[in-house]
Amino acid sequence: MLMKQTILYLPAQIAGPLFQFLAAMVWTFWLSPDAYGVLFYVMAMQELAFVLCLAWLSHYTLRFAGTFSTQSEREKYQQVENATLMVSSVLQIIVCVLSLALQGIPLTTSMIGATVLYVVTRSVTNYLAERARAGGQIALYTVAQTLGPVVGFGFAFLLVVFVRPQPDLALLGFALAHILGLLALWNGMGLRLTFARPDVAILKKALVFGVPLVVAGVIAWVSANGIRNIVQFEGGHEAVGLVSVGWALGQRLASFVAMLVTAAAFPLAVRYLREGAREKALHQLSLNGALLFALLAPATGGLMMILHPAVAVMIARPFQEVTLSVLPLAAFGGALRNLRIHTTDQVFMLFERTDLCVIASMIEAVVTVAACILGMRWGGLTGAVAGCVIGFIVGALFSFFYAVMRFGLRVLWGSVLRISLATALMMMVLWFLPEQRLAPHPVAQIILSLVLGGAVYGLALLALFPDALGGLRIKLNALRRREA
């Protein structure tokens, strides 16, 4: 069931994050470090605005929308939804203006307008994506997840290249694509704009469930994006732009890999728990954690093996030196953080203990900020990133320990060990076979290293997981018999 659902969600999980990953590299060739820093600050600020103003309803929707069985319940829920969307849009506009002013970004009409339009449309699109996911509307979820990053990047790129290379035009391009997506989503979901008073019972339940997750989200945002504020305070927007390339690429690589397998797992676990199968629900999250590790481990290890040719080809020269030192740390930290978010945090959400998400995020954030400040002063930009990674390690250790000891989450240590061995073998092969012996050109080196590394890892997994290989043989034999 998990594999089937994962495959159905796969287009949405690949296209959007992949283009975000590519955009982080492309902008280095068209934007100055200062402009790059402003653009990625606004993108990070949008995430904070969403968490503050709308995430509480998004979490409630993902967990409980499937329980509304009657038309009356669905109508009451939509009244809460419409009221929240309208109020949150106003609040996000205020957050936008205050954030720009606090960071010393020029408050021009174009910058304010583009920022507001981008933040509000992006946040509503994110919410509707989770609504579609909760309702099993995979096609609409795909639209929500891909139109902004893919089409929006196309619009933004054209405006930056042919009009002027400034962050406000890039934001405007993304916002235009979000507007198109919202029109399609609103129509496809059959939503109606109402101004009725929201149902108090649903609103109260949504707030009780969602507000702790909002607190956790704000704290988590500090962990993931506080580095930009710390670096900006110490070195200005140019330093933010320089560190943001490696930081964004590392974090988005981990998020991209994680989203390949996580979209389908939590709804399945919720379904099992609703049916009274507690152990089955926990096992579903354990399987998802092992599958996630099987993707994150080789992705992070493989990145370290192709780091120098990849940065030389894909990153503009002014950003390369800092990216080389920052990217491996950011990728490792992002992998740890995504393992926590998509495994143990989902255990806490499954059993409606969202307060534990807050505690785990708070521990992570406190250590991250303190270590980042110290690291920035002792080791510059690389030290700041290393400090963040220390915080991620501490937060992950606490969260996994509590999920295992309190809720009985079973870590599949045998699978973890075998996946680690396969990853180590892949890295060893690439280490002892320098890129120059594979191909003379960096692009060819990258491609051949990826192909070779993927082949070694895949064969190692098949050898280390003989049961999976046996199952594959059975399916192939059955397919041959049907064809015969």
Image (cartoon, rainbow, N blue to C red):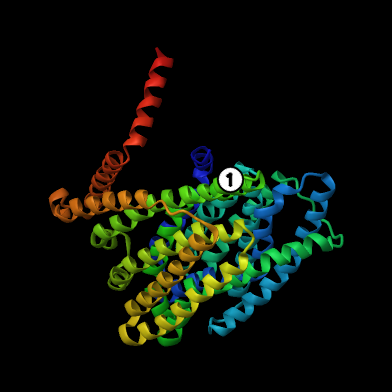
Q: Work out whether residue 259 or residue 39 is closer to the camera in this orientation and state it.
A: 259
Quadrant of the image occupied by residue 90: bottom right
Kindly identify the residue that appears in the image at 67 percent across and 73 percent down. 93
Which residue is most to the top? 484
The reply, left or right, for residue 378 in relation to residue 156 is left
Check disc 1 and give the amino acid type: Leu
Residue found 51% across the figure and 37% down from its top? 4
Mark 1 element type: helix
Rate crowding at label 1 as few (under 14), some (14 to 19) or many (20 or more) other CA atoms within 10 Å. some
Could you tell me which residue is drawn at 45 percent across and 86 percent down? 233
Q: Is 64 on the left or on the right of 406, as rendered?
A: right
The quarter of the image holding the C terminus is top left
Q: Is residue 104 above or below residue 196?
A: below
Image coords of residue 171 (percent x, y): 55, 65
Instruction: Report if residue 205 is visible in the image.
Output: yes
Question: In the picture shown, does residue 262 fall above or below 217?
Answer: above
**Image quarter for residue 379?**
bottom left
Disc 1: which residue:
268
Residue 80, position in %: x, y? 78, 60
Furthest residue to the right? 196
Image check: 128 left or right of 386? Answer: right
Between 396 and 42, the residue placed more toward the observer is 396
Measured as percent of width and height from the top left, residue 428 is found at 19, 54
Residue at image coords 43%, 16%: 482
Q: Choose between 414 and 349: the one closer to the eye.
A: 414
What x and y, as percent, mark residue 148?
56, 55
**So how many labels did they put on this image?**
1
Asked if one can make out residue 217 in the rendered structure from this viewpoint, the answer is no
Reply above or below: 45 against 336. Answer: below
